Image (cartoon, helix red, strand yellow):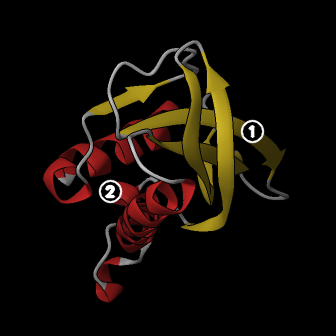
Amino acid sequence: MADITNRIEWILEQNVGELGLKYIAYGIHDTIPKSPAAIIEPGRKLREWRKTGSHTNNAFEVAIFHWFTGLGSESELQKALDPKTELIEKLIDTDALPTNDGGTRFNGLLIEGLCTEVQYGYRRTDDGRMRVNRIIFTGRSSTRVVV
């Protein structure tokens, strides 16, 4: 799971200028020091044995919280945040594609993956209430078990 979250963090860092991000971090945060920000949080990881061989099938979820605060109306804040959230989603989805489709499958870490959900809303932090869009990335991989 750490490899997947690190890859998402790398994708965001490579596109920080285009995304306009001022802060990228990993893990749960109660304080967001700069805005706009992207916080990558590992979610679930499920493993099951394959019927043959010494491999597991892995399914996992990673959440990317896209934070934004500023002056202006709620409508203006949402209009500023949404296109950048969609760009984050597109960049992650593009990297998850197979190489013949222009992606890298997260540099070979994935069998397949896709941003499957975007949730729009607010979240309370120590800094107050902030606009936040939550992107859920879902993927599958395979791991060889060495004993």
Circle 2 or circle 1, nearest the eye: 1
In which image quadrant can residue 45 be found? Answer: top right
Coordinates of residue 69 in the picture (x, y in percent): 43, 39
Q: Amino acid at mark 2?
A: Asn
Q: CA distance from mark 2 to mark 1?
A: 21 Å
Left/right of residue 107 with respect to residue 55 in the rendered view: left
Residue 10 numbered tag:
none
SS state under label 2: helix
* Quadrant assignment for the N terminus: top right
Q: Amino acid at mark 1?
A: Arg
Marks 2 and 1, the one that precedes in the sequence? 1
Q: Nearer the viewer, residue 142 or 34?
A: 34
Coordinates of residue 94 in the picture (x, y in percent): 37, 73
Query: Do the CB atoms of the residues marked 2 and 1 lie less than 8 Å apart?
Result: no
User: Which residue is identified by label 1?
Assistant: 44
Question: Which residue is most to the left?
Answer: 17
User: Which residue is identified by label 2?
Assistant: 107
Coordinates of residue 112 in the picture (x, y in percent): 56, 69
Left/right of residue 66 with respect to residue 128 in the rendered view: left
In the depicted structure, whether residue 118 falls above or below residue 60: below
* Quadrant assignment for the C terminus: top right
Label 1 Cα crowd, 10 Å radius (few <14 / some 14-19 / many 20+): few
